[in-house]
Amino acid sequence: MNKSNDNSVAPSLIKRSKKAFGFQACFRIKKSNDFTAVFLENKRISDQAMILYGIKNNLAITRIGLAVGSRIGGAVLRNRYKRLLREAFRTVRGDMPDGLDLVVVPQKKIHANVPF
C-alpha cells in the first residue's frame, strides 16, 4: 500500500501518542490539493474572528487545516494563532461530526485581541 496515495484513515489505525491529549498528524490537512478542494467548494461561514470553510471528506475522521497568512502579522503572531486554533479544535473534536475537512482562516481585524 502506497502511503502517499492512501487518504483514508480508519479510527482503529490512529496511533496513541505519548501525549494523551496531543494533536495527531492524521487530523491535519497538509496537502495543497486538499486545501484547494475545500476552497473551491466555497461552503463557508464567517464572523469577525475567522472564516470557516468545510466539505465532506469521505474519511472516518474530521480534519482541520489552518490558513494563517502574513497579513495577520509576523511569524510569532501567526504561530500563536495556529497553536490556539489547533488547541480549540483538539478540545471539541469529540463533539464534531466525522467526515469533514475544515479550513480556518483568521481575520486581520481581531489580531490585537489575541492574549499572550
Image: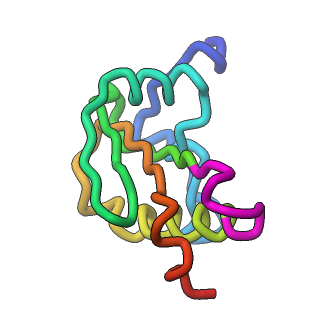
Residue sitting farthest toward the right: 75
Main secondary-structure element of the magenta-colored stretch? helix
Which residue corresponds to the image point at 39% horizontal and 29% vertical from the top-left?
38
Residue sitting farthest toward the bottom: 116
Look at the image and tell me in which quarter the N terminus lies: top right
Which residue corresponds to the image point at 54% horizontal and 44% vertical from the top-left?
28
Which residues are drawn in magenta?
Answer: 68-77
Look at the image and tell me in which quarter the C terminus lies: bottom right
| Residue 92 in the image, given as x and y percentages of width and height | 33, 66
Q: Quadrant of residue 3?
A: top right
Q: Is residue 76 above or below residue 7?
A: below
Which residue corresponds to the image point at 60% horizontal and 27% vertical from the top-left?
31
Instruction: Say left or right for 71 vs 96.
Output: right
* Total numbered circles: 0
- Colour approach in the figure: rainbow
Q: Nearer the viewer, residue 100 or 68?
A: 68
Instruction: Say left or right for 52 vs 67.
Output: left
Q: Is residue 89 above or below residue 71?
A: below
| Residue 10 in the image, given as x and y percentages of width and height | 42, 34
| Residue 74 in the image, given as x and y percentages of width and height | 75, 63
Which residue corresponds to the image point at 54% horizontal and 72% vertical from the top-left?
111
Q: Nearer the viewer, residue 2 or 91?
A: 91
Q: Is residue 10 above or below residue 102?
A: above
| Residue 53 is inside the magenta segment | no
Q: Quadrant of residue 62?
A: top left
